[in-house]
Amino acid sequence: MIFADNCVVAHRGAWKKNNFPQNSVAALKQAIILKCAGSEFDVRMTADDSLIINHDPKYHELEIEKTNYSDLIQYNLENGEVLPTLRQYIVAGMENNSQTRLVCEIKPSEISKERGKLVASMVVNLVKELHAEAFFVYISFDYDILKRILEIDPQAKTQYLEGDKSPEQLKADGISGADFHFSVFDDHPDWIELARKNKIILNAWTVNNTSLIDRFLKNKFDFITTNEPELVFERIQKLKLQQDIK
């Protein structure tokens, strides 16, 4: 895979400008059309062990971990899509896509840590089955989920979201990236250079306004996760023009 040479990761797909549902296949496809470097999405597991794409622990007031998939799909997404399974989402994400990474956030289980690790195992095994490894970056707030992924696939690209581990700790545990809320880098400005020193990928979320976007572009972050991918592309072009004039 030769991925797009930009830093733009569309948060839950490129949904906002066109009013697509977040985490929908339509939002994913739009991120691919925009040639984003990545499109992020969220994975949860139903009561009957179906891996689905949804951010919140509830879908139409139904607790996902305690509800069967057949009950969840009684309700379509706002654009008429059926609530996608991970399998469907991966297949859609690989179609006509030669540049956009699939940035897979595995949500911690609200039932148990062990169930969270089971979900991680099932996700990685499905990715292997579909030969989608080259597309995938795994992210999570649960450190043990990332560790389980690396147990199954030591070559997997992983990024940690919580922001309570230093770049040195990430490197020691084989985690590829620091994918932290932008405020973490205010609290730990030294982590930016420490990450580079330790060859840890830098990613900030969720960066949506011009001043923040410009700040992380000027700091040359590897990735910027945003609800405003079109705006980030605009700022990249403006910064490039400014540099060209200089």
Image (cartoon, rainbow, N blue to C red):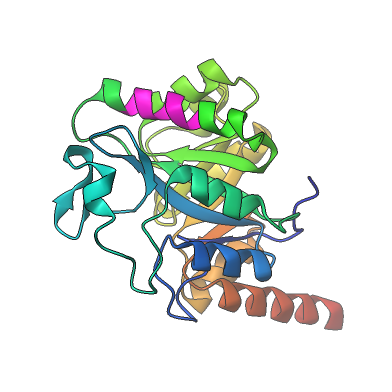
Chief secondary structure of the magenta portion: helix
Whether residue 231 can be seen here: yes
158 and 33: which one is in front? 33
Where 4 falls versus 42 (above or below)?
below
Q: Looking at the picture, does residue 198 appear above or below residue 13? A: above
Q: Which range is magenta? A: 116-124
Q: Is residue 107 above or below residue 83?
A: above
In the image, taking residue 202 as reference, residue 42 lies left or right, namely: left
Q: How many marks?
A: 0
Is 195 left, or right, of 85 in this rendering?
Answer: right
Residue at x 47% of width, y 65% of height? 207
117 part of magenta stretch = yes
Query: Looking at the rendering, in which quadrant would you find the C terminus?
Result: bottom right
Nearest to the observer: residue 73 or residue 172: 73
Quick check: can you spot residue 190? no
Is residue 199 left or right of 68 when viewed as pictured? Answer: right
The residue at 56%/47% (across/down) is: 90
Membership of 180 in magenta stretch: no
Q: Nearer the viewer, residue 176 or 44?
A: 44
Residue 39, quarter of the rendered image:
bottom right
Quarter containing the N terminus: top right
Measuring from the top left, give residue 68's x and y in whole percent.
23, 41
Q: Position of residue 230 (x, y in %)?
A: 59, 77
Residue 94: percent from left, percent from top:
66, 50
Residue lying furthest top: 151
Residue at the (57%, 34%) spot, across then down = 127
